[in-house]
Amino acid sequence: MNSSWVSQAIEKIEADFQRSADTHLIKLDIPALSGVDIYLKDESTHPTGSLKHRLARSLFLYALCNGWIKEGTTVIESSSGSTAVSEAYFAKLLGLPFIAVMPSSTAKKKIQQIEFYGGQCHFVDHSSQIYAESERLAKELNGHYLDQFTYAERATDWRGNNNIANSIFSQMEREPHPTPHWVVMSPGTGGTSATIGRYIRYQRLPSKLCVVDPENSVFYDFYNTGNANISCEKGSRIEGIGRPRVEPSFIPGVVDRMIKIPDAASIATINWLETLIGRKTGASTGTNLFGALMLAAEMQQAGQSGSIVTLICDSGERYLDTYYNPDWIAANIGCYQHYSGLLNQFSETGELTLPEC
């Protein structure tokens, strides 16, 4: 192995990190909530526009230090888009070829961004096919399969080292309720929820972790049954989160509670959020926030005070042809006006209950 090239590659990634400021923490203005504050960690401000920028950096450093990536290695990843965008960025930084294996339904904007950074897109028909196809390509090209779904939970130092949990709790220090009552996160690989949950326990904090799962995803059922062999025929309609199989990086032992969020609620929530912050966000942010609002309503009803933190995973500009396209929504999600009504009621009363299915 060319140790000089590896050393230079790590230095380039570290220098890029040093040039990047931390992401913002946004406090929502919801007058109906009394004593319960909700914050959004805005991960869309990373250089590649999403939470996955952190993961991509960690995966590249992990692979470099393990000797898996060398000069000229073709890097391959299975992804629904955002991780691949960020990995294409780091592959370009290091001068490495990059191939993203992704479902053909991936948002066009993500495909364009991967190609902008010099990556190639390799499409499959269903999200369940991305794993085997990535392994096949890696073997055929003598490349390295980054495999975010296996390594996300171990590539990041969850004890500190400016991980996302460390950043959240540091930024909350001067707030009225500095230690969040809840941190809310949705699972894609499960790596971020593992990092947050482990950090909370390692730092001996009273905060609890709630993981919110979209439709057509197995994490919620796995959490409640313990059956790691369950699978889902349909792929998640909320890009970046939800999986048809239980991913190795999802660690249920660090999760205090899980909530299943209807996809229509996620779409309604990103439209509601736009009226509060004047910006479009991806649908996974809607999943996160709807869960946070449910918890806030429960806290208020119980007479509790405190704070809740969740994430803006990426910008809605990537999804103008899907989540902000009425025709796409009608064909893929259906009517979400019932949840819009619930959110408007929440704005007035602070009450929000997910209806029984």
Image: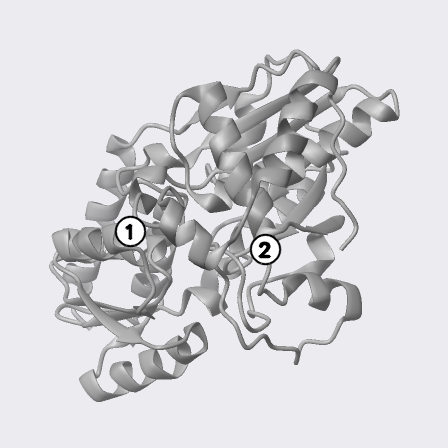
Residue 236 visible in the picture: yes
**Amino acid on which disc 2 is placed:** Pro
**Amino acid on which disc 1 is placed:** Ser
Q: Between residue 51 and residue 54, name the one nearer to us.
A: 51
Residue drawn at 74 percent across, 32 percent down: 352
Identify the residue under disc 2. Answer: 214
Q: Pinpoint residue 311: horizontal percent, then vertical percent.
A: 51, 36
Question: Seen from this angle, which residue lies furthest right?
Answer: 302
Helix or strand or loop: what does disc 2 sit on? Answer: loop
Q: Quadrant of residue 244?
A: bottom right
Quadrant location of the N terminus in the rendered image: bottom left
Q: Indicate which disc residue 86 carries.
A: 1
What is the crowding at mark 1: few (fewer than 14 residues within 10 Å), some, or many (at least 20)?
many
Residue drawn at 75 percent across, 49 percent down: 257
Q: Pinpoint residue 294: horizontal percent, then vertical percent.
A: 72, 35
Helix or strand or loop: what does disc 1 sit on? Answer: helix
Compare marks 1 and 2 and give the one earlier in the sequence.
Answer: 1
Q: How many marks?
A: 2
Q: Mark 1 or mark 2, which is nearer to you?
A: 2
Residue drawn at 45 percent across, 52 percent down: 330
